[in-house]
C-alpha cells in the first residue's frame, strides 16, 4: 500500500483502479488510514464524480466503509466538506466502533478547518449520534462546549418527565450494558447519602451521568 502511495502521482488512474480492485486486502484500520486519503482521497480532490465514496460507504464490509470516510480527509484538507458530512450522516446509525471513531475523527478535522461547519452539523445530529462518534468529534472543543454537546436534551425530556430515575437507569443500561446500571446505582446511592431528593434532582443526576 505504501508503494501505491509513493507511485500515485505517476499514474493516478491506474493506482486507484488497482487499489479499489484489492480492497479485500485492506483489512485493518491502519492499512486504511495510511492509504485511503493519499490514494482515493487525493484522486477525488479535483473530480466531480465521487460516487465511489458512496458505493464504499454502502458496502457491508467495514473496511470499505472506513475507506469511504477516511478518504475524505484529503477533501477536508482542501476545504471540501460536503462528502464528509453526507457520509457522516449516513453513518449515524452504525453499530461499528471503528466506523464511529473514524467518522468522529473526520468531523473533528472538518472543525479544524471551519468550526462553524462542524457546530452546525452537531447541532442538527448530536441527539442521535453514537456517543463515541460525538466524543471524537468534539475533542478539540473547550470543556464547556463539550459538556453542551454531550447534554442530550431530547433524551432528558423524554426520560426525566414523568418517568424520573427509573427510566434514566434503563436508558444507561440500554446504552452501556450492565456497567451503565452499576454506575447508575452507585451514583444514585451517593446522591441519596448527600441528602438529595432524587425526584427533584433527577436532572442534576442525569447531567452528572452524561458528563462521564
Image (tube, rainbow, N blue to C red):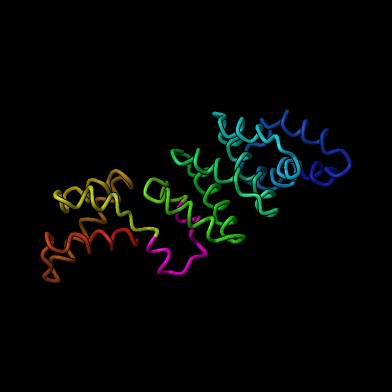
Q: Position of 55 compared to 100: left or right?
A: right
Q: In the orientation shown, which residue stands out farthest toward the bottom?
A: 194
Q: Residue at x 48, y 40 (%)?
A: 96
SS assignment for the magenta stretch, majority: helix
Q: Position of 200 compared to 51: left or right?
A: left
Q: In the rendered view, tell whether residue 202 sits above or below residue 11.
A: below
How many numbered discs, if any? Answer: 0
Q: Residue at x 50, y 38 (%)?
A: 90
Residue 23 in picture, x, y percent from top left: 68, 32
Residue 212 in picture, x, y percent from top left: 34, 61
Q: Where's the N terminus, which quadrant? A: top right
Q: Position of 44 compared to 181: left or right?
A: right
Residue 205 in picture, x, y percent from top left: 22, 62
* Residue 136 painted magenta: yes
* Residue 166 painted magenta: no
Stretch in magenta: 134-148
Q: Residue at x 71, y 38 (%)?
A: 48
Residue 98 in picture, x, y percent from top left: 52, 44
Q: In the orientation shown, which residue stands out farthest toward the right?
A: 10
Q: Nearer the viewer, residue 22 or 157?
A: 157
Amino acid at each position: 500500500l505504501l508503494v501505491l502511495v509513493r507511485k500515485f502521482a505517476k499514474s493516478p488512474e491506474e493506482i486507484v483502479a488497482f487499489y479499489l480492485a484489492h480492497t479485500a486486502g485492506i483489512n485493518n484500520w491502519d492499512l486504511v488510514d495510511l492509504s485511503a486519503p493519499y490514494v482515493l482521497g487525493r484522486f477525488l480532490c479535483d473530480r466531480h464524480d465521487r460516487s465511489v465514496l458512496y458505493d464504499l460507504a454502502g458496502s457491508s464490509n467495514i473496511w470499505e466503509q472506513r475507506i469511504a470516510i477516511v478518504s475524505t480527509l484529503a477533501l477536508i484538507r482542501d476545504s471540501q466538506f460536503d462528502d464528509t458530512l453526507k457520509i457522516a450522516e449516513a453513518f449515524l446509525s452504525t453499530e461499528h466502533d471503528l466506523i464511529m471513531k473514524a467518522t468522529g475523527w473526520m468531523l473533528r478535522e472538518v472543525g479544524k478547518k471551519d468550526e462553524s461547519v462542524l457546530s452546525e452539523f452537531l447541532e442538527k445530529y448530536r441527539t442521535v449520534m453514537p456517543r463515541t462518534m460525538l466524543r471524537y468529534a468534539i475533542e478539540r472543543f473547550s470543556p464547556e462546549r463539550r459538556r453542551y454537546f454531550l447534554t442530550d436534551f431530547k433524551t432528558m425530556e423524554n426520560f426525566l418527565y414523568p418517568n424520573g430515575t427509573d427510566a434514566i437507569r434503563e436508558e444507561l443500561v440500554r446504552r452501556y450494558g450492565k456497567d451503565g446500571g452499576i454506575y447508575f446505582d452507585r451514583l444514585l446511592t451517593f446522591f441519596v447519602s448527600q441528602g438529595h431528593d432524587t425526584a427533584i434532582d433527577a436532572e442534576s443526576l442525569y447531567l452528572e451521568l452524561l458528563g462521564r
